Image (cartoon, helix red, strand yellow):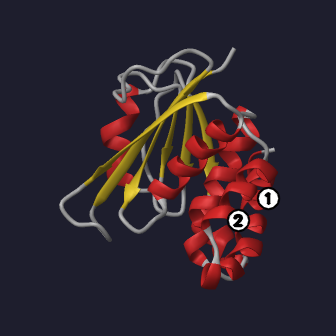
Amino acid sequence: MINEKVIIAGFGGQGVMLMGQLLSYAATEKKINTLWFPSYGPETRGGTANCSVTISDSYVNSPVISTPDSIIIMNKPSLAKFQPKLKAGGHLFLNTSLVTDVECREDVIVHEIPANEIAAELGNVKVSNMVVLGAYLAITKLFTEEEVLDILKKKFTGSKANLIEVNRKALEAGRKAVL
């Protein structure tokens, strides 16, 4: 049975919304119930941004996630805001490139991913979101990298099509970072 509730949070411009959309679209492709709910701060780029994604075999009736199964944290301010909500035993995915010197709860499973450094090694720091998403996919096994990449291919057309390969490498690198 599938019933995953995830909150993804960071600064605007970090690809937080894209991660949530990809998960939701992948669920839709597999005919699994899903709901993606974005939330933006006052600015788009550089302001706070988060989204909630629910993926379930059951009907999804609310966009509000009070106790997520997982949280993906791309920056330090988001950790303070969302870590208290994570359920005991839940998965906390940290972009340790930007989230350093922090106290994490002892009742959750912490996955540390130096996403910005990994993305820089791949030649494009903007794919740090895909690095963390690759780690998330590896741990949760909700979808395969290929399923998410197929959605990305539909989204990235025209001039963005040349970004598919670096995003594929980023997903793979994220998986390798946590396995």
Front tag of 1 and 2? 2
Q: Is 81 placed left or right of 55 in the picture?
A: left
Q: Is 170 placed left or right of 106 in the picture?
A: right
Image quarter in which the N terminus is found: top right
Callout 1 amino acid: Glu
Q: Residue at x 38, y 26 (%)?
A: 65
Q: Position of residue 113 (x, y in %)?
A: 63, 54
Badge 1 density bin: few <14, some 14–19, many ≥20, Cα 10 Å: many
Image quarter in which the C terminus is found: top right
Q: Residue at x 40, y 34 (%)?
A: 83
Q: Rounded to the nearest whole Å, what is the CA distance between mark 1 and mark 2?
A: 16 Å
Name the disc covering residue 153, or none. 2
Name the disc covering residue 42, or none. none
Based on the displayed image, in which of its 4 quarters is residue 150 positioned? bottom right
Q: Residue at x 68, y 41 (%)?
A: 29
Callout 2 amino acid: Lys
Q: Residue at x 41, y 69 (%)?
A: 13
Q: Is 97 placed left or right of 161 in the picture?
A: left
| Residue 13 seen by the camera | yes
Q: Earlier in the sequence, mark 1 or mark 2?
A: 2
Q: Return the residue found at the far left.
A: 42
- Are the residues flagged by discs 1 and 2 in contact, CB closer than 8 Å? no
In front here: 126 or 22?
22
Tag 2 secondary structure? helix
Badge 2 density bin: few <14, some 14–19, many ≥20, Cα 10 Å: some
The residue that label 1 is drawn on is 172
| Residue 100 seen by the camera | no
Against 145, residue 105 (above or below) is above
Against 34, residue 19 (above or below) is below
Q: Is 82 placed left or right of 161 in the picture?
A: left
Q: Position of residue 76 (x, y in %)?
A: 38, 53
